Amino acid sequence: MLKDRPYLCQIPSVSIPSQNETTRAKDKAEEAAEIARATDRGWELLKDMEGHCMYFISGWWSYSFCYNTDVKQFHQLPPGKGAPNFPPMEDPSTPTYVLGRFERYPHPDSDRKANPRIDAPKEDIPPSFHSAHQSPNTQLRAKGDLRYLVQKLSGGTTCDLTGRDRKVEVQFHCHPQSSDRIGWIKEVSTCSYLMVIYTPRLCNDIAFLPPRENKAAPITCQEILASTSDIPEWRARKQAEAERKMVAASSSG
Protein backbone atom coordinates (compact mmCIF):
# COMPACT_ATOMS: atom_id res chain seq x y z
CA MET A 1 0.00 0.00 0.00
CA LEU A 2 1.20 3.52 -0.85
CA LYS A 3 -0.91 6.48 0.18
CA ASP A 4 -3.74 4.04 0.90
CA ARG A 5 -3.63 2.73 -2.67
CA PRO A 6 -2.68 -0.85 -3.59
CA TYR A 7 0.36 -1.39 -5.83
CA LEU A 8 1.93 -4.41 -7.48
CA CYS A 9 5.72 -4.17 -7.35
CA GLN A 10 8.38 -6.18 -9.13
CA ILE A 11 11.62 -6.66 -7.18
CA PRO A 12 14.61 -7.71 -9.29
CA SER A 13 16.33 -10.90 -8.24
CA VAL A 14 20.05 -10.71 -7.59
CA SER A 15 21.89 -13.98 -7.79
CA ILE A 16 24.72 -14.46 -5.30
CA PRO A 17 27.24 -17.04 -6.49
CA SER A 18 27.81 -19.82 -4.02
CA GLN A 19 31.33 -20.25 -2.72
CA ASN A 20 33.16 -23.08 -1.10
CA GLU A 21 36.77 -23.59 -0.04
CA THR A 22 37.79 -24.64 -3.55
CA THR A 23 36.27 -21.60 -5.30
CA ARG A 24 37.65 -19.24 -2.63
CA ALA A 25 41.14 -20.64 -3.07
CA LYS A 26 40.78 -20.35 -6.86
CA ASP A 27 39.61 -16.74 -6.56
CA LYS A 28 42.59 -15.86 -4.35
CA ALA A 29 45.01 -17.48 -6.78
CA GLU A 30 43.44 -15.62 -9.73
CA GLU A 31 43.53 -12.35 -7.80
CA ALA A 32 47.23 -12.84 -6.95
CA ALA A 33 48.01 -13.59 -10.60
CA GLU A 34 46.10 -10.49 -11.73
CA ILE A 35 47.93 -8.28 -9.21
CA ALA A 36 51.29 -9.59 -10.46
CA ARG A 37 50.25 -9.03 -14.08
CA ALA A 38 48.91 -5.53 -13.44
CA THR A 39 52.01 -4.54 -11.48
CA ASP A 40 54.29 -5.69 -14.31
CA ARG A 41 52.14 -3.94 -16.89
CA GLY A 42 52.02 -0.74 -14.83
CA TRP A 43 55.79 -0.76 -14.58
CA GLU A 44 55.98 -1.06 -18.37
CA LEU A 45 53.54 1.80 -18.90
CA LEU A 46 55.38 4.16 -16.57
CA LYS A 47 58.88 3.53 -17.91
CA ASP A 48 58.34 6.08 -20.70
CA MET A 49 58.30 8.79 -18.01
CA GLU A 50 62.06 8.38 -17.71
CA GLY A 51 63.90 11.51 -18.75
CA HIS A 52 60.91 13.73 -17.97
CA CYS A 53 60.28 15.94 -14.96
CA MET A 54 57.06 17.36 -13.49
CA TYR A 55 56.69 20.39 -11.27
CA PHE A 56 54.28 21.57 -8.62
CA ILE A 57 54.20 25.00 -6.94
CA SER A 58 52.62 25.41 -3.52
CA GLY A 59 53.24 28.76 -1.87
CA TRP A 60 56.88 29.27 -0.91
CA TRP A 61 57.88 25.78 -1.95
CA SER A 62 58.15 24.23 -5.37
CA TYR A 63 58.55 20.53 -6.05
CA SER A 64 60.06 18.52 -8.87
CA PHE A 65 59.50 14.88 -9.72
CA CYS A 66 61.96 13.36 -12.17
CA TYR A 67 61.10 9.74 -12.90
CA ASN A 68 63.85 7.29 -12.00
CA THR A 69 65.89 10.13 -10.46
CA ASP A 70 64.49 11.94 -7.42
CA VAL A 71 61.88 14.19 -5.82
CA LYS A 72 63.03 17.64 -4.69
CA GLN A 73 61.64 20.50 -2.63
CA PHE A 74 63.05 23.96 -3.35
CA HIS A 75 62.27 27.67 -3.46
CA GLN A 76 61.63 29.03 -6.93
CA LEU A 77 64.00 31.63 -8.34
CA PRO A 78 61.87 34.75 -8.89
CA PRO A 79 60.89 34.99 -12.57
CA GLY A 80 62.70 37.57 -14.63
CA LYS A 81 66.30 38.26 -15.62
CA GLY A 82 66.49 34.99 -17.49
CA ALA A 83 64.42 32.93 -15.02
CA PRO A 84 61.18 31.60 -16.58
CA ASN A 85 57.80 31.50 -14.91
CA PHE A 86 57.65 27.78 -15.62
CA PRO A 87 59.23 25.39 -15.04
CA PRO A 88 60.40 26.81 -11.72
CA MET A 89 64.14 27.12 -11.30
CA GLU A 90 65.91 26.43 -8.00
CA ASP A 91 66.98 29.51 -6.07
CA PRO A 92 70.66 28.88 -5.24
CA SER A 93 70.47 31.24 -2.25
CA THR A 94 67.99 28.97 -0.40
CA PRO A 95 68.32 25.30 0.62
CA THR A 96 67.10 22.54 -1.68
CA TYR A 97 65.92 19.29 -0.10
CA VAL A 98 65.82 15.87 -1.74
CA LEU A 99 62.68 14.13 -0.50
CA GLY A 100 63.60 10.73 -1.94
CA ARG A 101 65.69 9.01 -4.56
CA PHE A 102 64.87 6.19 -6.93
CA GLU A 103 66.79 2.96 -6.58
CA ARG A 104 68.26 2.21 -9.96
CA TYR A 105 67.16 -1.20 -11.23
CA PRO A 106 67.96 -2.30 -14.79
CA HIS A 107 64.98 -2.81 -17.03
CA PRO A 108 64.46 -6.25 -18.65
CA ASP A 109 64.92 -4.71 -22.13
CA SER A 110 68.45 -3.62 -21.26
CA ASP A 111 69.23 -7.01 -19.74
CA ARG A 112 68.18 -8.72 -22.96
CA LYS A 113 70.95 -6.81 -24.75
CA ALA A 114 73.53 -7.50 -22.08
CA ASN A 115 72.67 -11.17 -21.53
CA PRO A 116 72.71 -13.30 -24.72
CA ARG A 117 70.79 -16.04 -22.92
CA ILE A 118 67.75 -13.82 -22.79
CA ASP A 119 66.80 -14.29 -26.41
CA ALA A 120 63.14 -15.20 -26.03
CA PRO A 121 60.48 -12.84 -27.40
CA LYS A 122 59.52 -10.13 -24.92
CA GLU A 123 56.04 -11.58 -24.45
CA ASP A 124 57.55 -14.97 -23.56
CA ILE A 125 59.52 -13.61 -20.60
CA PRO A 126 57.76 -14.78 -17.43
CA PRO A 127 56.25 -12.13 -15.12
CA SER A 128 58.61 -13.22 -12.33
CA PHE A 129 61.53 -11.98 -14.43
CA HIS A 130 60.03 -8.51 -14.76
CA SER A 131 59.11 -8.44 -11.07
CA ALA A 132 62.68 -9.29 -10.07
CA HIS A 133 63.87 -6.15 -11.86
CA GLN A 134 61.47 -3.83 -10.09
CA SER A 135 62.36 -1.92 -6.98
CA PRO A 136 61.14 -3.81 -3.90
CA ASN A 137 59.50 -0.52 -2.92
CA THR A 138 57.19 -0.63 -5.94
CA GLN A 139 53.77 -2.15 -5.38
CA LEU A 140 50.19 -2.17 -6.56
CA ARG A 141 47.71 -0.97 -4.00
CA ALA A 142 43.93 -1.30 -4.00
CA LYS A 143 41.42 0.94 -2.27
CA GLY A 144 38.00 -0.53 -2.84
CA ASP A 145 37.75 -1.03 -6.60
CA LEU A 146 40.44 1.58 -7.28
CA ARG A 147 43.96 0.35 -8.11
CA TYR A 148 47.10 2.43 -8.34
CA LEU A 149 50.86 2.01 -8.26
CA VAL A 150 52.99 3.08 -5.33
CA GLN A 151 56.73 3.75 -5.16
CA LYS A 152 58.37 4.46 -1.83
CA LEU A 153 61.51 6.54 -2.17
CA SER A 154 64.04 7.02 0.59
CA GLY A 155 67.59 8.34 0.87
CA GLY A 156 66.57 12.00 0.89
CA THR A 157 68.29 14.90 2.60
CA THR A 158 68.82 14.28 6.33
CA CYS A 159 66.03 15.75 8.43
CA ASP A 160 67.20 18.14 11.14
CA LEU A 161 64.31 17.19 13.43
CA THR A 162 64.52 13.39 13.25
CA GLY A 163 68.12 12.78 12.21
CA ARG A 164 66.85 10.40 9.53
CA ASP A 165 66.70 10.68 5.77
CA ARG A 166 63.65 12.28 4.24
CA LYS A 167 61.31 9.89 2.41
CA VAL A 168 58.34 10.18 0.09
CA GLU A 169 55.61 7.86 -1.11
CA VAL A 170 54.64 8.49 -4.73
CA GLN A 171 51.25 7.26 -5.91
CA PHE A 172 50.45 6.91 -9.62
CA HIS A 173 46.74 7.12 -10.45
CA CYS A 174 45.04 6.63 -13.79
CA HIS A 175 43.44 9.86 -15.04
CA PRO A 176 42.13 9.58 -18.62
CA GLN A 177 41.52 13.34 -19.08
CA SER A 178 44.88 14.47 -17.74
CA SER A 179 48.46 14.74 -18.92
CA ASP A 180 51.23 13.59 -16.59
CA ARG A 181 51.01 15.96 -13.64
CA ILE A 182 51.50 16.19 -9.90
CA GLY A 183 48.06 16.36 -8.30
CA TRP A 184 49.24 17.34 -4.84
CA ILE A 185 51.91 16.74 -2.22
CA LYS A 186 51.80 17.02 1.55
CA GLU A 187 53.97 16.29 4.55
CA VAL A 188 52.09 13.49 6.33
CA SER A 189 54.54 13.36 9.23
CA THR A 190 57.84 15.03 10.05
CA CYS A 191 60.03 14.83 6.91
CA SER A 192 57.78 12.11 5.44
CA TYR A 193 55.78 13.06 2.35
CA LEU A 194 53.01 11.82 0.10
CA MET A 195 52.85 12.80 -3.58
CA VAL A 196 50.00 11.89 -5.93
CA ILE A 197 50.62 11.84 -9.69
CA TYR A 198 47.84 11.64 -12.26
CA THR A 199 48.75 10.01 -15.55
CA PRO A 200 46.84 8.70 -18.57
CA ARG A 201 49.55 6.07 -19.11
CA LEU A 202 48.09 3.65 -16.54
CA CYS A 203 44.68 3.98 -18.18
CA ASN A 204 45.99 1.77 -20.98
CA ASP A 205 45.42 -1.20 -18.67
CA ILE A 206 41.92 -2.01 -17.49
CA ALA A 207 43.20 -2.83 -14.00
CA PHE A 208 43.88 0.87 -13.29
CA LEU A 209 40.76 2.39 -14.84
CA PRO A 210 38.42 4.19 -12.42
CA PRO A 211 35.66 1.85 -11.23
CA ARG A 212 32.36 2.06 -13.02
CA GLU A 213 29.37 3.26 -11.08
CA ASN A 214 27.21 0.35 -10.02
CA LYS A 215 23.62 1.42 -10.33
CA ALA A 216 21.02 -0.28 -8.17
CA ALA A 217 18.48 -2.41 -9.98
CA PRO A 218 15.14 -0.54 -10.05
CA ILE A 219 11.99 -1.69 -8.28
CA THR A 220 9.01 -1.05 -10.55
CA CYS A 221 5.48 -0.63 -9.20
CA GLN A 222 2.09 -0.31 -10.86
CA GLU A 223 -1.06 0.86 -9.14
CA ILE A 224 -3.83 -1.74 -8.96
CA LEU A 225 -7.22 -0.48 -10.14
CA ALA A 226 -10.36 -2.15 -8.86
CA SER A 227 -12.17 -1.87 -12.21
CA THR A 228 -11.97 -0.19 -15.62
CA SER A 229 -14.29 2.53 -14.36
CA ASP A 230 -11.43 3.81 -12.20
CA ILE A 231 -9.25 4.54 -15.26
CA PRO A 232 -10.54 8.10 -15.98
CA GLU A 233 -9.99 9.14 -12.37
CA TRP A 234 -6.52 7.57 -12.40
CA ARG A 235 -5.56 9.42 -15.63
CA ALA A 236 -6.80 12.74 -14.19
CA ARG A 237 -4.78 12.19 -11.03
CA LYS A 238 -1.60 11.38 -13.00
CA GLN A 239 -2.11 14.49 -15.17
CA ALA A 240 -2.44 16.66 -12.07
CA GLU A 241 0.75 15.14 -10.57
CA ALA A 242 2.67 15.82 -13.82
CA GLU A 243 1.49 19.46 -13.86
CA ARG A 244 2.57 19.98 -10.22
CA LYS A 245 6.03 18.60 -11.04
CA MET A 246 6.36 20.96 -14.01
CA VAL A 247 5.41 23.98 -11.89
CA ALA A 248 7.88 22.94 -9.15
CA ALA A 249 10.67 22.46 -11.71
CA SER A 250 10.08 25.85 -13.36
CA SER A 251 9.98 27.68 -10.01
CA SER A 252 13.18 26.07 -8.78
CA GLY A 253 14.99 26.90 -12.06
Image (cartoon, helix red, strand yellow):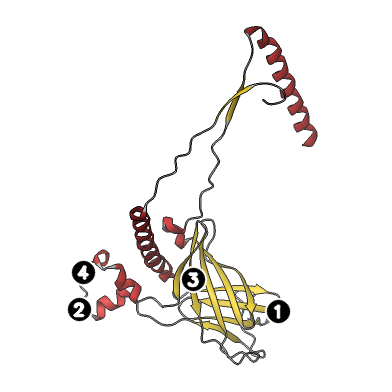
Q: Earlier in the sequence, mark 3 or mark 4?
A: 4
Q: Nearer the viewer, mark 1 or mark 4?
A: 4
User: How many numbered tags mark residues here?
Assistant: 4
Task: Report the side of 113 relative to 67 (left or right).
Answer: left
Q: Amino acid at mark 4?
A: Ala
Residue 135 versus residue 210 in the image, above or below: below
Q: CA distance from mark 2 to mark 1?
A: 51 Å
What mark, if any, has residue 150 been given in the picture? 3
Which quadrant is home to the C terminus? Answer: top right
Q: CA distance from mark 3 to mark 1?
A: 27 Å
Rendered residue at 35%/62% (across/down): 33
- What residue is pinned by disc 1? 60
- What residue is pinned by disc 2? 116
Q: Amino acid at mark 2?
A: Pro
Task: Report the side of 146 relative to 48 (left or right).
Answer: right
Rendered residue at 28%/78% (across/down): 111
Q: Earlier in the sequence, mark 2 or mark 1?
A: 1
Q: CA distance from mark 2 to mark 4?
A: 10 Å
Work out whether residue 95 or residue 223 is closer to the camera in this orientation and state it.
223
Q: Earlier in the sequence, mark 2 or mark 3?
A: 2
Q: Quadrant of residue 190?
A: bottom right
Q: Are marks 3 and 4 in contact (CB under 8 Å)?
A: no
Task: Report the side of 235 relative to 154 (left or right).
Answer: right
For disc 2, the neighbor class at 10 Å (few under 14, some 14 to 19, many from 20) is: few
Q: Amino acid at mark 3?
A: Val
SS category of the residue bearing label 1? loop
Work out whether residue 83 or residue 36 is closer to the camera in this orientation and state it.
36
